[in-house]
Amino acid sequence: MHLRHAIVTRDHKSNYPNPVSFEPGDRLDVGAEDTEFPGWVRIIDPVGNEGWAPLEYIQRSEHHSTGVALKAYSAKELDVEPGDRLTVNDEHCQWCWVEHADRGAGWVPEECLKAVE
């Protein structure tokens, strides 16, 4: 799905009040890969928050239990409601990084969005 603008078709509320984030070079604890959304992996960030991150943003160690961040990332999800209009800035493994005019930016599942002109 290649979107530039989207409208929300169903609610999405974040379940993660303390989203993981990291900067290039940060050391991370790396856990299991997500079975529902392939391409995502469970991590613990440098300040101890636990959550999901794109596997391609991490260079895993030989034993796969640790890694180094290759690029900046924030797991902040955006709470959205049907009818909200969004700008889609990035897509990764069935999730979209979006911006809302009043609520800022964050990740929303692609399945909650419909492309608009």
Image: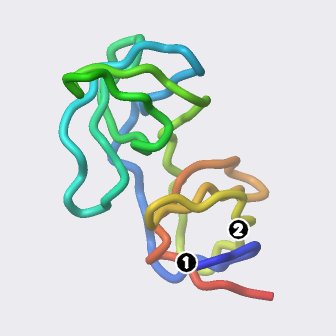
Q: Which residue is mark 2?
A: 86
Q: Residue at x 74, y 75 (%)?
A: 5
Q: Nearer the viewer, residue 29 or 9?
A: 29
At label 1, the amino acid type is Leu
Residue 18 is left or right of residue 63, and the answer is: right
Q: Nearer the viewer, residue 73 or 100?
A: 73
Q: Is residue 58 above or below residue 82?
A: above
**Percent coordinates x, y for residue 67 in the rendering:** 36, 22
Q: Residue at x 36, y 54 (%)?
A: 39
Q: Residue at x 31, y 59 (%)?
A: 38
- Asked if the residue at tag 2 contacts the one at tag 1, i.e. Cβ–Cβ closer than 8 Å, the answer is yes
Q: Nearer the viewer, residue 63 or 35?
A: 63
Residue 38 is left or right of residue 7, and the answer is: left
**Percent coordinates x, y for residue 29 in the rendering:** 28, 20
* Quadrant of res 47: top left
**Percent coordinates x, y for residue 20 in the rendering:** 43, 29
Sequence-wise, which precedes: disc 1 or disc 2?
2
Residue 20 is left or right of residue 63, and the answer is: right
Residue 113: image tag: 1
Q: Is residue 92 above or below residue 72?
A: below
Q: Secondary structure at mark 1?
A: strand
